[in-house]
Amino acid sequence: MPRQTDDSDPRQPLIPNVSSSSYSRPESGYSTIVDVASDDSDNTISAVDNHDDFHHGIGHRHYSDRTPWLRAAVLGANDGLVSVAALMLGVGGGNADLQTMILSGVAALVAGALSMACGEYVSVASQKDTEEADTAREKQEFLKGPAAQAREMAELAHIYESRGLSKSTAMLVAKELHDRCAGNIDEIVKVHMRDELNVDLDELANPVQAAVTSAITFSVGAMFPLLAGAFISDWQKRIYSVLIISTIGLILNGAMGAHLGGAALWKGAVRVLIGGWIAMGATFGVGYWMGGTV
C-alpha cells in the first residue's frame, strides 16, 4: 500500500508515493502534487505550471537571492559613511578650520566613490570573464561529438547522485534535462554551468551596474558626516555633530542591511556600529596627536 498523508496537518514533510511515483506536501490546507511517470521509451514530468503558485502559501521566505546586490549596497554605504567621517574627524582633530574639514570630506567623497566604482567594475568584470571562459570551454566539450556529450551527461548525473539521488534516478534527471533542451547546445551548457559551477548564465553580473551602484551608495553614505559638519563653525560642536550623525547612520545602515537579509536587526546594527567607531576613534586620535594644537 502507498503511504498516505493527512492533508489537514501542515507539519508533514514531502512524502514520496512509491507506487505512483508522486510527491505531495500538505501546507495549511494547500497541497501540491507532482506526478512523475516514466518508462523505457518516455520520461515525462507533470508539474505545477506557475512557479509562484507552487510557492504561494508555503509560509516562509528566503533571502539568499538578495546577497549580491545587498552586499554591494551595504558595503558601499558603510564604506562611504565610515571613510568620510573618519577622515573628517582625523583632519578636525588636528585642525580646527571649518573649510579644511569640509574640503577633506568632499575630497574623500569624490575619491572614494570613484575608487569604489573602479574597484567594483574590475572585480565584477574579472569574475564575468572567468565565467564566460568556463562557458566557452564547456561548450567546446559538447561540440566534440556524442561521446563527449555522453561523458558530460554522466558527470551531471554523478553530481545529482552526490546530492543524494540514487544512481538510476540521477541519470534519469540528467537525461530529462538534456532531452528538454532538444539538442540546443547553448541550453544544455546552461544546465551544466548551473549545476557544475553554480553559474547562472541568464543572470551574469553586470560590471557597469555594479560600478554605478557602488559609487551611488558610497556617496549616499558619505553625505551623513559631510552635511553634519559642513555648517557648524564651532570646532567642538562640529566634531560631536559628525560623530553623532555618523553613529545614527551606521545603526540605520546595519539595521537596514539585516532587515533586507532577514537577519536580526540588532546584530547587524551592532556589528556595523562597532567597526565604524573603531575607525573614527583611531583616525581622530591620530589627527589630534599629530596636530597637537587644537
Image (tube, helix red, strand yellow):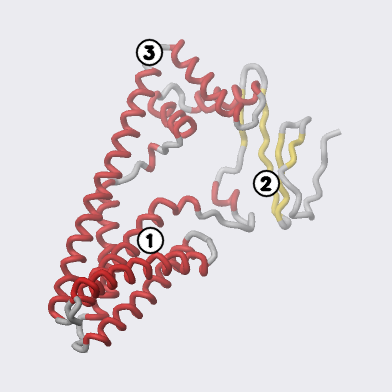
Residue on which disc 1 sits: 74
Residue on which disc 3 sits: 144
Looking at the picture, tell me which residue is in the foreground, 291 or 270.
291
Label 3 near label 2: C-beta < 8 Å?
no
Mark 1 and mark 3 lie on one chain; the one further toward the N terminus is 1
Query: How much space separates mark 1 and mark 3, taking CA atoms?
Result: 45 Å
Label 1 residue SS: helix
- Nearer the observer, disc 1 or disc 2? 1
Mark 2 and mark 3 lie on one chain; the one further toward the N terminus is 2
Residue at image position (70%, 49%) is 31
List x then y, in percent, for residue 5: 80, 45
Q: Horizontally, is 63 left or right of 132 in the view?
A: right
Mark 1 and mark 2 lie on one chain; the one further toward the N terminus is 2
Q: Residues within 10 Å of mark 1 (few under 14, many from 20)?
A: many
Label 3 residue SS: loop
Q: The disc labelled 1 sits on which kind of residue?
A: Val
